[in-house]
Image (cartoon, helix red, strand yellow):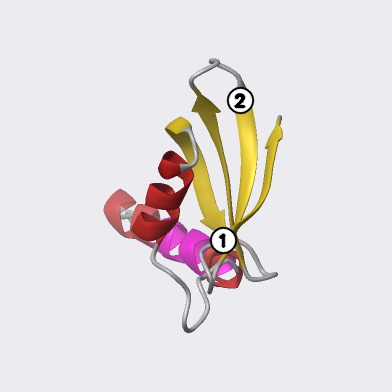
Amino acid sequence: MIKTINLKSVAAAVLATAALATAPFALADKPGPGWITIEKAIEKAKSSGYTEIYKIEADDNGYWEGEGRKADSLTYEFRIDGTSGNIVRDQKD
C-alpha cells in the first residue's frame, strides 16, 4: 500500500517545532516588571537627539538597548535603564 504525505501537515509540524525550539530565546529578552514601555524608550532616545531608531530590544540586565542615527548621519548605540528611563550609554557605533 502506498501512503501519501500531506505537505500542509508536514509544513505545519516543521513550523511548530521551529517555534518551540526558539521559544526560550524569545522569552529571555522580555521587559521586566516595572519597566518603561518600548514606546517610552524610543521617545526618550528621540528626545536625546536620535532621528531614526534601527533596533531596540530588552536585554537580560535591565536595559533597553538600541541603535539609531542622529542628525550627523552617524550610527550610535544607546542603553536606557528599563525602570528609570535614564540614558546610561550613548556612543558612536
Q: Given the current orientation, which residue lies at the most extreme top position?
A: 73
Q: Position of residue 81 (x, y in %)?
A: 60, 65
Mark 2, mark 1: which one is toward the viewer?
Answer: 1
Q: Is residue 87 above or below residue 75?
A: below
Badge number at residue 75: 2
Magenta residue check for 79: no
Q: Position of residue 37 (x, y in %)?
A: 39, 66
Tell me which residue sits at (46%, 82%) in the image. 34
The answer to the question of whether label 2 and label 1 lie on touching residues, with beta carbons closer than 8 A, is no
What whole-number distance in Å separates the C-alpha atoms at marks 2 and 1?
20 Å
Of callouts 2 and 1, the N-terminal one:
2
Magenta residue check for 19: yes
7 and 91: which one is in front?
91
Q: Position of residue 71 (x, y in %)?
A: 48, 20
Tell me which residue sits at (71%, 29%) in the image. 93
Q: Given the current orientation, which residue lies at the most extreme bottom position?
A: 33
Type of residue at label 1? Answer: Asn
Tell me which residue sits at (28%, 53%) in the image. 8
Badge number at residue 48: none
> In this figure, which residue is indicated by the disc labeled 1?
86
